[in-house]
Image (spheres, rainbow, N blue to C red):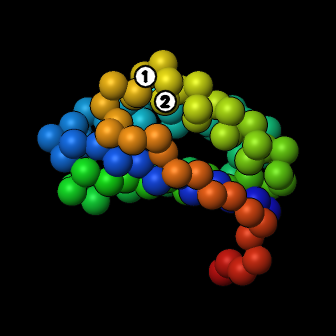
């Protein structure tokens, strides 16, 4: 399995709007990515959020990185205060 973590920064007052955009717009999109297993979004309530996407292999993770970049550019860029940080890698341990 392969995972991608994305770290976002935004104004705390935009958190609810971002939560809605992610839930209603991005989740249905990423679920269509090749090898999709799971997606989680968390909002700290203090102007930061992170997502965790899990895929069967690197190809699906790579596809999700492109999907997310395009989605953010089209739907969230005006809400973010800096470019998202993206880390990815093979899952080495899980339960």
Q: Position of residue 91 (x, y in %)?
A: 74, 70
Q: Residues within 10 Å of mark 2 (few under 14, many from 20)?
A: some
Q: Quadrant of residue 15?
A: top left
In the image, 79 versus 57, the foreground residue is: 79
Q: In the image as oriented, which residue stretches furthest toward the front? A: 82
* 17 shown above or below 6: above
Mark 1 packing: few (<14 Cα in 10 Å), some, or many (20+)? some
Residue under numbered circle 1: 75
Is residue 30 shown to the viewer in this render? yes
In percent of width and height, residue 82 lies at 39, 41
| Marks 1/2: CA–CA distance | 5 Å
Q: Residue at x 21, y 56 (%)?
A: 46
Would you say the residues marked 1 and 2 are in contact, meaning their CB atoms lie under 8 Å apart?
yes
Residue 66: which disc?
A: none
Residue at 58% x, 35% y: name it: 68
Image check: 27 left or right of 88?
A: left
Quarter of the figure that contains the N terminus: bottom right
Q: Is residue 67 above or below residue 86?
A: above
Identify the disc placed on residue 72.
2
Q: Secondary structure at mark 1?
A: helix
Q: Horizontal and vertical percent for residue 2?
A: 76, 59
> Between residues 40 and 87, which one lies in front from this camera angle?
87
**Do we see residue 20 in this rendering?**
no
Q: Residue at the spot x=19%, y=47% of the render?
A: 12
Q: Residue at x 39, y 28 (%)?
A: 76
Q: Nearer the viewer, residue 1 or 50?
A: 50
């Amino acid at each position: 399995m392969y995972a991608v973590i994305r770290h976002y920064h935004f104004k705390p007052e935009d958190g609810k709007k971002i939560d809605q955009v992610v839930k209603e717009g991005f989740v249905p999109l990423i679920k269509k990515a090749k090898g999709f297993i799971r997606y989680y979004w968390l909002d700290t309530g203090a102007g930061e959020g992170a997502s965790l996407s899990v895929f069967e292999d690197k190809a699906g993770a790579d596809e999700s990185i492109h999907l997310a970049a395009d989605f953010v550019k089209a739907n969230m860029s005006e809400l973010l205060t800096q470019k998202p940080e993206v880390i990815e890698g093979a899952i080495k341990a899980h339960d």
